[in-house]
Image (cartoon, rainbow, N blue to C red):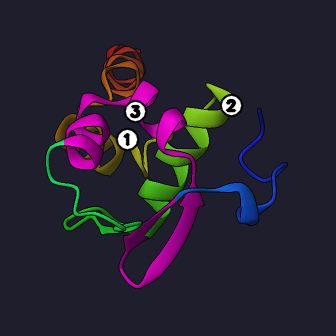
Amino acid sequence: MNYYSYSSQLCDVIIEVEGTHFHAHRSVLCELSPYFRALFVRWNSPGQFIYTIPGVAQKIMKSIIQYGYSQRIRITRKNVQALLEAADYLLVEDIVHLCGQFLEK
């Protein structure tokens, strides 16, 4: 599923990073990462649907969320460090692994 191929009206969560809102589906983010699963289950307040994620750049979060929908990500020399740090922080093991492979090249 492409991140941009659905209507934000069907989303049930908003991830806020650096003032930018990313509309998404809890189920997709929970599948992507145990961090999101814990965020939505353990630290959830009734009726809460906006979650602010500190310490992650807007462009990096966009890439990570897109990966959750497409299983594709563009890793470059310019973004690999920030992507690796964010993926490690957010427990997105697939992206951590992909960044490791990129760095081994």
Stretch of the chain drawn in magenta: 13-41
For disc 1, the neighbor class at 10 Å (few under 14, some 14 to 19, many from 20) is many
Q: As drawn, is 7 to the left or to the right of 83?
A: right
The residue that disc 2 covers is 70
The N terminus - image quarter = top right
Give the mark, 2 or 3, whose residue is nearer the N terminus: 3
Spot occupied by residue 54 in the image (x, y as percentages of width and height): 20, 68
Residue 80's disc is 1
The residue that disc 3 covers is 30
Give the mark, 2 or 1, whose residue is nearer the N terminus: 2
Residue visible at 74% across and 65% down in the picture: 9
Report the amino acid beneath label 3.
Cys
Report the amino acid beneath label 1.
Val
Spot occupied by residue 24 in the image (x, y as percentages of width and height): 57, 53
Q: Quadrant of residue 15?
A: bottom left
Residue 68's disc is none
